[in-house]
Image: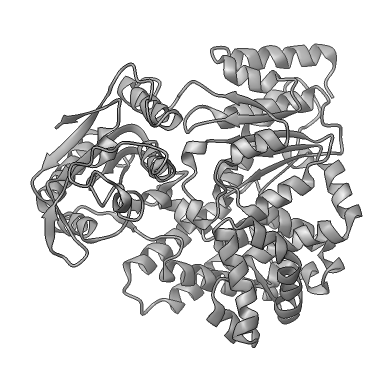
Amino acid sequence: MLSESEQHQLLEKLRTLHSDDEKQLEVIFSESKRLIVEAPAGYGKTKTMISKVAYLLATGQIAHPKKILTLTFSVNAAYKIKKELSEHLPHLIQPINSNQFRVNERLFVSNYHGFCRHILKKYGYLLHSNLSNIEILKSVDDSESQEITALLDISYDKASIFTEYSDAVKSVDKQHVLKFFNRYTDGIIESFLDKDYISFNGILALTLRLFQDYSEVLHFYQGYFPMIIVDEFQDTNVLSWALLKKLVADRSQLVFIGDSLQRIYGFIGAIPNLMLEAEQLLSMDRIALEKNYRFMSNPQMLQLDKNIRLNAEKPDAPAIQIKAEVPFISVNNQLEESEKIAQKIISLISSEDRQLCKVAILVKQRGENVNKIIEVLMEKNISYFYALFGDDDSEYLSFHRECSSQFTEQLRKDIRISKGTLSKFYIKIAETFKHSSSPVIKSLLNLLEVFLSRALSDYSFLSAEDKLILIRDTFENRTLKQNMEYVNENVIISTIHGAKGLEWDYVLMPDMEQYSMPNWNGLCGACNHKSNCNLTVDSRNEKNFLEELSVFYVGVTRARKQIVFSASKTRFKADGTTQPANLSCMLKLPGIAVVEQ
């Protein structure tokens, strides 16, 4: 703990650092023991979090040797935060305190699975001896009955126990998850661990089981982590939420950071309205950050961000004061749209430093419309990176499974993480997929190479154990796509879901038409305004509207400098034929005015 004089110096430094942002300062200096912070993209959440941690440590609120636990939904976010903390936190504390400050001694930063692996490696032997060697257990997807049946040599009925539980996690069926928890974890222990396998959900569930059966282990961690910070809180699923609630003791200090409008992973289990649920259940005080720093010098984008959020706050009557003008390309057909997009890309790249300018084309989904864009880019020799893969695409899943399996096998022979061992690993994966002509596999090999290089360079500050966990978690969480912003190509073509958490200078969002954005399943299928797409939000469609608005908002906020929308008056159907298309209701929202280019 710093002296009173040193504390005063730090407080003045923090006030200067955040001098023009009252809400950030409110978070940092709040005396509330439990805060939930609404932090949209670009509002300075990481900077605020670092200063909050510095303040807590400097004022002795986290006494050594206890630690702050910082958890995130994604692997990429966890290590970004860890890097930011490692780079900036010592500069806030160390010049004042002559003793060298080491982040790892005062904080534990991880995603949920990395945290659970850490616990199971230490205490998992209480459930099964093989958990002591969790780093070399082979990972298996417990949502695939046929795969489980073949790998574990069990009946289809027994495999269904695991697939039904996986489905319940994805569909946020809290009743099923709770009712069959012991049956599921018993099955993981008996059927998986005995044969050196572990499942993605099993890692979280077994940690919960450990806490349930061995209260002394739970009490130790509740005391060891008196402060819990959670980022990306809106993406938390039922197992992660159950884990968090277990870790929270009466005296626990909490800071949960998230943005309800960026909850786009509902299809894989993100709990609806979780921030409100946590606020009420855990008696948390709410603070909303208000200043957008990403678009501070860009009034047009700043207004767009504000107006989309106002539509989310009150969908039936948003309090819009000033309309946001957005650049818009309107054409007659998909070929013309593709040509205009190619021209726009050429113009953007030629007007800036070619090596630095990054452009993303973001779409809701794959289909004939985006295929036409790719066709035109190829005709014009515009190099691009193909990232149109989803979390549940078979090739995307199989590639990550193969990486996880081969990396585990390599660890059994050599647990070192070095340039040589990672090079050997990459060569093995490339050899495995050498006969594939799939653009997905080609892109994933590229992402794997980029990721392994970053593991040695960008994450050089990590310990050998942390690097191992980073690599394992990336494969098991299927997050190689999070390395897209580091590929060499100037142009990226991705789904909006795949781009969450990433940023580019410019974002183009094509196919802003009925049945594309939103699509049939999202909102269009049940809409009563199919003839004109003049959406009216009411109690019947508000839930679906907010889900689609979240996807739209995430796409918009991937741009650092500018968003450009485009649409055509005809679109391709799934069978390759064309049909007339209306302009998307997202571009007709109150507060949005399209300006044709």
Quarter occupied by residue 202: bottom right
**Colour mode?**
one colour
Q: Depth check: 115 or 58 in front?
A: 115
Left or right of 590 on screen, residue 166: right
* In this view, 99 is above or below 407: above
At a point 80% along the width and 22% down the height, the residue shown is 59
Q: Is residue 62 visible?
A: yes
Left or right of 538 on screen, residue 413: right
Quarter occupied by residue 583: top left
| Percent coordinates x, y for residue 203 in the rendering | 69, 63
Left or right of 332 on screen, residue 137: right
What number of labels is visible?
0
Q: Depth check: 460 or 285 in front?
A: 285
At a point 83% along the width and 58% down the height, the residue shown is 212
| Percent coordinates x, y for residue 114 in the rendering | 68, 55
Q: Is residue 492 visible?
A: no
**Can you say which quadrant of the picture contains the C terminus?**
top left
| Percent coordinates x, y for residue 540 in the rendering | 40, 43
Most extreme residue toward the right is 216
| Percent coordinates x, y for residue 586 in the rendering | 29, 38
**Can you say which quadrant of the picture contains the N terminus?**
top right
* In this view, 444 is above or below 583: below
Left or right of 579 on screen, residue 584: right
At a point 75% along the width and 63% down the height, the residue shown is 206
